[in-house]
Amino acid sequence: MAKKKVNKTNAIRLVEQKKIPYTEHEYTWSEGHVGTDQVAKELGQDENQIFKTLVAVGNKTGPIVAVIPGSSELDLKKLAKISDNKKVEMLHLKELEPLTGYVRGGCSPVGMKKLFPTFFDQSAQNFDTIMVSAGKRGLQMELSPIDLANLVRGTFADLLAHEEE
């Protein structure tokens, strides 16, 4: 029986090129918002290990990437401070694909059109592996957060908005 040919994404190609061990995970994606809680349930994974990739724009640096737990909220002030910007705002959705090559729901920190300054929430370091988008909707890749950060020259920092602030 012929094996189903999987079209590799830029993210997966880059991870393989650097010989970084990873595991692919497919899940059901629909236009109605798929939250990390649903993805975690479908994949049988810890929701805290599923990270989302957000793209913002700094007033000094231009585009910057934040990788945070999917159930958390990004603190733009913390991102501005760690990225040497005075102000940071989220990238407009219509600009995401032309800038990164990825669509909403399939944006990976790996394999964007350019390597932008990338920041990972420090909580990623609490896990042996985390899951991030593999570059298309319905596809995640699980790999070491250290390997991932090294690949995109990322920095770990506190990026999360906390309730008590």
Image (spheres, rainbow, N blue to C red):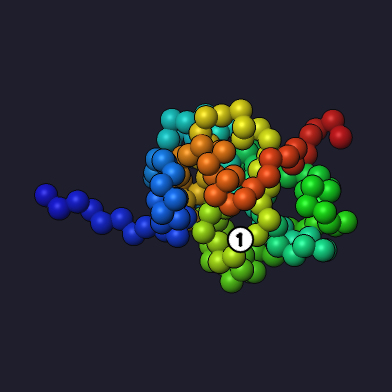
The front one of 137 and 121 is 121
Q: Quadrant of residue 84?
A: bottom right
Image point (19%, 51%), residue name: 3
The image quadrant of residue 10 is bottom left
The residue drawn where x is 75% and y is 65% is 62
x and y, in percent, of residue 100 in the image: 58, 64
Residue 87: % across, % down: 85, 57
Q: What residue type is labelled 1?
A: Leu
Quarter holding the C terminus is top right
One can see residue 51 in this view: yes
Q: Position of residue 76 (x, y in %)?
A: 79, 49
Q: Place residue 159 in its image quadrant.
A: top right
Q: Which residue is drawn at 58% across and 46% down?
A: 150
Q: Is mark 1 on a helix, strand or loop?
A: loop
Q: Where is residue 1 in the image (x, y as percent from the top left)?
A: 11, 49
Residue at 61 percent of width and 28 percent of height: 126
| Neighbour tally class for label 1: few under 14, some 14-19, many 20 plus, Cα within 10 Å | some
69 with respect to 85 (left or right): left
Can you see residue 38? no
